[in-house]
Image (spheres, coloured by chain):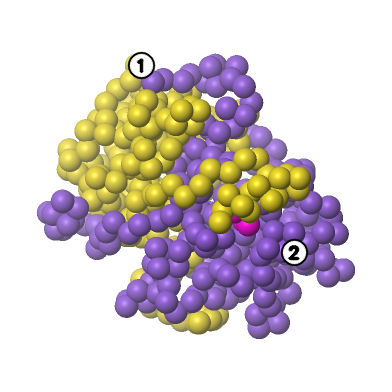
Chain colours: A yellow, B purple
Amino acid sequence: MIITRKELGSMHRIRRLNIVNSITGVKPANLIGTRSLSGSDNVAIFSSVVHLGSDPPLIGFVSRPKGEVARHTLENISETKKFTINHVRTDLVANAHLTSAKFKRDESEFEKCGIENEFINGFHAPFVRQSEVKIAMSLKDRVPIESNGTVLIIGEVEFVFIEPTALTEEGYIDLEFSRSAGISGLNSYYALKKLSDFPYARPENAEEILENGR
Amino acid sequence: MIITRKELGSMHRIRRLNIVNSITGVKPANLIGTRSLSGSDNVAIFSSVVHLGSDPPLIGFVSRPKGEVARHTLENISETKKFTINHVRTDLVANAHLTSAKFKRDESEFEKCGIENEFINGFHAPFVRQSEVKIAMSLKDRVPIESNGTVLIIGEVEFVFIEPTALTEEGYIDLEFSRSAGISGLNSYYALKKLSDFPYARPENAEEILENGR
């Protein structure tokens, strides 16, 4: 079934949103935690978190700067330069989804959505207690995306908290162990089931990799 | 367990790569297909594809411009302005992973990795036959990310191919139906299992959403 650019354009808005938001594949379900200078806490779900590089460790997320929900997150980051990224655990997807509702500026999504906050090592922004992987971030840059008026917020990792049970024997994060959820579109949530770990790919180990996948 | 920025910096490079590449959560497994002006086909796995907006439908991916593997993809896109994005089906993860090996410029990863190419509607770049969701893309912009010398390649959707069995009754893509895979780190692959679909979140339907998640 082929859907052309023109057909997408003339589709009902919600249907287009759902299709275009799911055609890129699974997205990570993350809660971004922030605290305003005056001490109001905010937590909001984002599916656009993207790894940008490992040295220095940089992570970005894409946001509509004037979106109703993202605005509080972006305002708090502008004020304090600090935010946290927290994996959504599979048993918390309903609570995480509810953070996308338009609560008032002085209402804490933590309270309204039944999510517990937590402060670690004196970091200014709140973490999500129930997350097994959480990251303390410092704002590094804001890159405007002129094609559609969104912005790529870039942060540098200050520290990472990982629940020891989320680590493999080799010390890597297993997203099935950490019960990290995925998202497709605007409102569908997925659990992850590990299929395979492969070695670094080289033309010389092609047979080994293809064999492992059988 | 807390890992500080400093500890990350002094870690063995491969261990740091594996941790920092997996702390953002699940990433979509996509094969990007390109064809040079002279007709050489290339297909390469990318885990950094990100939805940027729905109207116009824009999709980006992040790449190191001088990376050995990504270079052929980026050169072909520069030459032709066309590329395809294809979901990696769970039974094709080994083949997809192998595309990250450094094959020679004139070797086709399609042949070397046992991936079948396909041309749809006269579009210049090759698709992956076995993918159930595939997207024809036109280059729209290149946004340099100065913080680490990477680049965000932005494309506009020309058309989308969706296997009808990958659609829900409401016409949305179900990533479990399409057998789309997720990635964590550099070499771990996951299958997706649908947990829940939620309605658009509003403060007024908080109870309904939280109830649905129990």
Identify the disc placed on residue A121.
1
Whether A202 is drawn above or below A187: the answer is above
Q: Amino acid at mark 1?
A: Asn
| Image x and y of residue B63, in percent | 67, 47
Range of the magenta residues? B93-97
Q: Which mark is residue B111?
A: 2
Q: Judge left or right: residue B91 versus residue A103.
A: right
Residue B163 visible, this orientation: yes
Q: Toward the viewer: A205 or B146?
A: A205
Q: Disc 2 sits on a residue from what chain?
A: B
The secondary element bearing badge 2 is classed as helix
For the residue pair B78 and B87, the one nearer the viewer reads as B87
Host chain of mark 1: A
The answer to whether B83 is drawn above or below residue A3 in the figure is above
Quadrant in which residue B134 is drawn: bottom right
The spot of residue A50 in percent (x, y) is 52, 44
